[in-house]
Image (cartoon, helix red, strand yellow):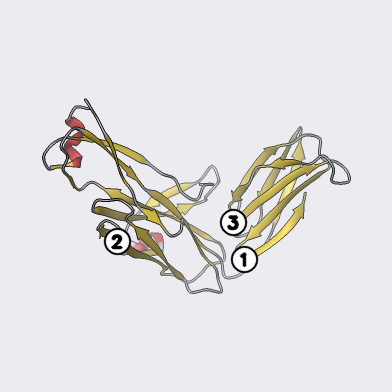
Amino acid sequence: MNRPAFIPITWFPVRAAAIPIAFAGMLGLLAAVPAQAGIALSKVIVDLAPDTPPRDDIEVINDGSERQYVVAEPALIQAPGTPREKRIDSSDPTVTGLLVTPQKLVLEAGERKLIRVALIAPRGSNERVFRLAIKPVAGTVEAEQTSLKVFVGYDVLVIARPAATTGKVVATRSAGTITFHNGSNASVEMSDGRQCDEGRRNCLPLPPMRLYSGADWTVPIKHAPLVEYRVQQGKLSSKESF
């Protein structure tokens, strides 16, 4: 959950004559030649701030040389970033709270189309997190020799910010580590982290992280009197010391 997108890769062997890719797994891989079925997106994070309309568009681009069949599969993420995290996949907006349209696309080579995501319920007191898997799916392939088909897709992060933000990120230290807890009702991006000795000398970098509401994150540190991070929540950003 901490990365904005993943790139799942599926291999399908195909050979001469037009055949459905779904059945190509039964074919041999001798003399295999890889071919990539690729799409690109205009964005992989959709951040629906409370002062903006509760909707946004994602442009899907077919940057390959073949027709692409694309699906968009929404999911609600409960308790993201915690041990209780659960993904609820459903195309029904009454289940997830997110309307996605269209959920199926056909793109010719070089063609671009839009997918709209929209909230169907008022913003609540806590942030809501969704994932939207946008990926090519099997169509019909023609090849003069045995080949491999590689599908590349994305898991878009969709964030519905609460109407008002409360709480903050706090930290505790213990035995060479520092643990951050997001006590606010919205996720934050922690970046430009560093640990320094007194006087901000001999600083070492610390890794970035998206920390969801209610989640904890533990980072190993040396004996460092000062730990700093840039904490960004939506459009608001500040440098914090822990």
Q: Secondary structure at mark 3?
A: loop
Q: CA distance from mark 2 to mark 1?
A: 32 Å
- Give the secondary structure at mark 1: loop
Where residue 54 sits: x, y (%)? 47, 71
Q: Earlier in the sequence, mark 3 or mark 1?
A: 3
Q: Earlier in the sequence, mark 2 or mark 1?
A: 2
Q: To which residue does mark 2 refer? A: 111
Task: Please provide percent x and percent y for residue 202.
Answer: 82, 39
* Residue for badge 1: 235
The three-letter amino acid code for the residue at tag 1 is: Lys
Label 1 crowding class (10 Å Cα cut-off): few <14, some 14-19, many 20+? few
Whether residue 204 sits left or right of residue 20 in the image: it is: right
Question: Farthest residue in the top direction?
Answer: 30
Q: Give the distance between the C-alpha atoms of the residues marked 3 and 1, in whole angstroms.
A: 12 Å
The foreground one among 112 and 106 is: 112
As helix, strand or loop, the secondary structure at mark 2 comes to loop
Quarter-of-image position of residue 220 = top right
The x and y percentages for residue 175 are 76, 32
Which of discs 2 and 1 lies nearer the camera? The answer is 2
Q: Residue at x 54, y 61 (%)?
A: 127
Left-right relation of 110 to 44: left
3 and 1 marks in contact (CB < 8 Å): no
Nearest the eye: 188 or 68? 68
Tag on residue 187?
Answer: 3
Q: Nearer the viewer, mark 3 or mark 1?
A: 1
Q: Describe residue 28's horizontal placement relative to residue 154 as left or right.
A: left
Question: Extreme right residue here?
Answer: 199
Under mark 2, the amino acid is Glu
Residue 10 location (% of width, % of height): 31, 38
Q: Nearer the viewer, residue 50 or 46?
A: 46
